[in-house]
Amino acid sequence: MKNVLVVYNNNAGRKKGIMYKKKLHKYLLKEAVVFKFVTLDELRDVDITPYETIVAMGGDGTVNAVIPFVINDKDKTLGIIPCGTANLLAEKLGISANFNKALKVFKVGVKTKIDVLKINDEPCILRMGLGYDADIICKTPQSLKHKFGYFAYFVAGFLFALRLKKKAYLIEVDEQKLVVSASCIIVANASNMYRNLVSVSKGCALDDNLMDVFILKTTNPILFFLELIKMILLRHKNNKNAMYFKTNKLSIKNKWMNAHIDGEKKVLKEGINVDIEKLSVNVICQISSKKRANTPKKVQGSLAEKRSVLSYK
């Protein structure tokens, strides 16, 4: 570690970012490395060429803002000091939201390569959500997140589950065209949600060249919560209410889609094309992403299973 650029978000984690910035500044001074701190707004105007390590200090939104500057650059390494609301990528990589523990990973952690989703050519490190998942991310008031932190998403998740709505989507996967009526679609690189309590996949690895796809096909809150319990217990199984599979290429079409991409609200009018940028980002983590998968890598659901599940109306 020689030259370090720190990209920080003062508003992250109910102002926790300000305190973390002071601590990291003190550490870098002590180490006598060349470093610079910039805000998210300043990042686009900075020449990042001299910097070997780009540190995202904030939440998942801060990490996602840094990704375009490190993707497919073998000379750049992403470091994470999590202090946001969710910190899902950090959780997946074994990086604690406790500053001292996160700093230890930054100092002595291993460097690994991870995949990144490309959604209509836009990098996505975590996941894209349509329907219910987009409502939770995009419609939870910022005031609630500042007041209650991550718990605000639990409250919003419960309330939005009581008013699920379906939309028809055309999905192209494995050279097949499938029509599905769904209340929620999640396409994930890191499939963990709610602080690793829920995962849309039994075994999600950040370096397997696969995306995890979850499709909820019910508007019944009781059936939804049953699927949620199955996720918590890692009992994912294709049925008439839900569908799970992995793929490395996906297309989704609908006339008008409100979505979120890594927590940022998007309105997608022309459809969605999702690809994998395999092992395209160097990142410092506690242990390799392979070892943090819940189960061994295994492609869930054959195409025949996908068709059988989608045949339910």
Image (cartoon, rainbow, N blue to C red):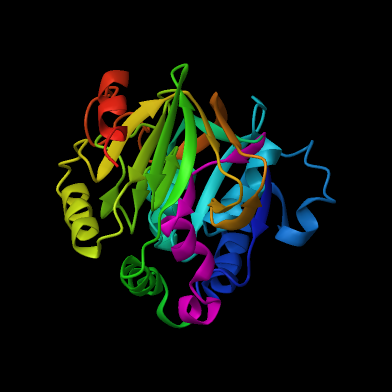
In the rendered structure, which segment of residues is drawn in magenta?
121-146
104, above or below 115, in the image: below
**Is 138 one of the magenta-colored residues?**
yes
Q: Residue furthest front?
A: 313
Q: Is residue 190 above or below residue 177?
A: below
Quarter of the image that includes the N terminus: top right
Q: Is residue 240 left or right of residue 92?
A: left
Which of these two is toward me, 150 or 237? 237
Q: What percent of the width, then of the height, locates residue 136?
A: 44, 64
Q: Quadrant of the C terminus?
A: top left
Q: Position of residue 37 (x, y in %)?
A: 71, 58
Q: Is residue 28 magenta?
A: no
Image-based side of 33 in relation to 154, left or right: right
92 relative to 23, above or below: above
Q: Residue at coordinates 40% horizontally, 24% vertically from top-left?
A: 208
> Residue 54 occupies which quadrant of the picture?
top right
Residue for point 40% across, 74% down: 152
Residue 21 in sight here:
yes
